Amino acid sequence: MGMYKYIKETFEKEYHERSMILRKRITEWRKQGTVSRIERPTNLARARSLGYKAKEGIFMARVAVGRGSRKRPHPWGGRKPAKNVAYLSPGKSLQRQAEEKAARTFSNLEVVNSYWVGQDGVKKYFEVIMADRKLLPNVKGRAFRGLTSAAKKGRQQ
């Protein structure tokens, strides 16, 4: 077996057993902001399979997205039957929302891909692989135009 297979198995074991390492990690992430730049990926095997390389111009960001249904605001237009719903579906996956948050925060970078790294009762955490625009000269706004793999999963073709 190669090194990345061992890394993958270790991470899967941590997630399934809810290990102490994972719980510590998520506690630290909770204290950070919604979007924070990180030096290296948490799950190296997954990041490499999605296009990450440890070279100049490639960056990583961890994004926290709120879990659960989106509670809709108070119905200011009156209590009409059409407005009498508690939750609305945003129509986008949480992973896609994470990619868009990262793209807004780091507007000089382009989203390459993203993957799930953990979750707690309130948030889901994704790591987003981003590249400098110099590496992708003819590409702009991939996250917002539905060109990342997370966005392609949700759309009808």
Image (tube, grey):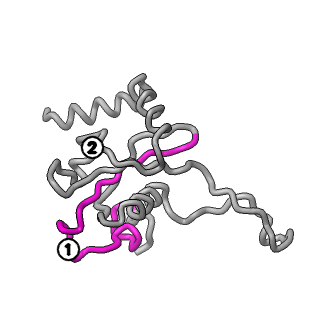
Q: Within the magenta stretch, is there residue 148?
A: yes
The answer to whether 76 appears left or right of 129 in the picture is right
Amino acid type at image mark 1? Pro
- For mark 2, give the secondary structure: loop
Residue at the spot 34% in from the left edge and 65% down from the top edge:
148
Could you give the CA–CA distance between mark 2 and mark 1, rounded to whole angstroms? 24 Å
Of 57 and 19, which appears nearest the observer?
57
User: Does the rendering let one see residue 153?
Assistant: no
- Mark 1 sits on what residue? 137
Q: Residue 8, located in which quarter of the rendered image?
A: top left
Magenta residues span 122-150
Amino acid type at image mark 2? Glu
Q: Residue 81, located in which quarter of the rendered image?
A: bottom right
Q: Percent position (x, y) of residue 101?
A: 44, 59
Q: Percent position (x, y) of residue 28?
A: 44, 33
Residue at the spot 47% in from the left edge and 46% down from the top edge:
33
- Furthest-top residue in view? 20
Whether 19 is drawn above or below 43: the answer is: above
Tag 1 or tag 2, which sits nearer the N-term? Answer: 2
For the C terminus, the image quarter is bottom left
